Image (tube, helix red, strand yellow):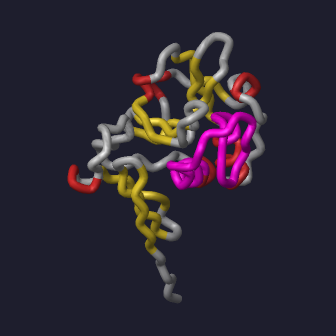
Amino acid sequence: MTTARTTSRRSFRGLAVTAIAGAGLVLAPLPASANSTAPSAAVVTAAPVAAASGAAQTAVDTALAQVGDPYSWGATGPNAFDCSGLTSFAYKAAGVSIPRVSRDQATFGTAVAKSDLQPGDLVFFYSPVSHVGMYIGNGQMVHAPSSGSSVKVVNVDSMPSYSGARRVA
């Protein structure tokens, strides 16, 4: 039996994102000439990291496919997101139901030390928790940051007030 593989390539804020059916997303920095706008925090410098479970990988792939979509408070997709709307949308695509808001997501699943983060883990910020992103590996996360912005990839350590992480799949 032969399996057909389809490939598509899109550019989002300094990242080349290649989707290969059945293999997830592959991230690579674009050449400087392809990213002539202001420098972006969305630079992946190391090879992508595979998630430990299929559900987590599907959630990561789904969240990354939303890079560039606008932030909208209370939005749950498919064309706009707030932070917890993005994470719940991504896990819903993986067949995993998680709470809708970041504060509730911060008590769901299993607590994970920052040093043990794996792709698909939810990372939380502020006290009380009011922001969530999804860890994608190599110190990076994808999130819907705030009004006037769009879904993007940033370094976890570029965010203020890290408050914890949870593994849900």
- Is residue 75 found left or right of 43 in the rendered image? right
Q: Is residue 169 visible?
A: no
Pinpoint residue 80: horizontal percent, then vertical percent: 65, 47
Q: Residue furthest bottom?
A: 1
Q: Nearer the viewer, residue 159 or 167?
A: 159
Q: Residue at 68% of width from left, 47% of height from top?
A: 91
Q: Is residue 70 visible?
A: yes
Q: Quadrant of residue 168?
A: top right
Q: Is residue 152 magenta?
A: no
In the rendered image, the vertical position of residue 95 relative to residue 144, given as above or below: below
Q: Quadrant of residue 128?
A: top right
- Is residue 122 found left or right of 41 in the rendered image? right
Pinpoint residue 10: horizontal percent, then vertical percent: 43, 62
Q: Residue at 53% of width from left, 89% of height from top?
A: 1
- Is residue 27 found left or right of 70 in the rendered image? left
Q: Residue at 31% of width from left, 39% of height from top?
A: 38
Q: Nearer the viewer, residue 89 or 81?
A: 81
Q: Residue at 46% of width from left, 68% of height from top?
A: 20
Query: Magenta segment, which residues?
Result: 59-85
Q: Nearer the viewer, residue 72 or 128?
A: 72
Q: Main secondary structure of the magenta part?
A: loop
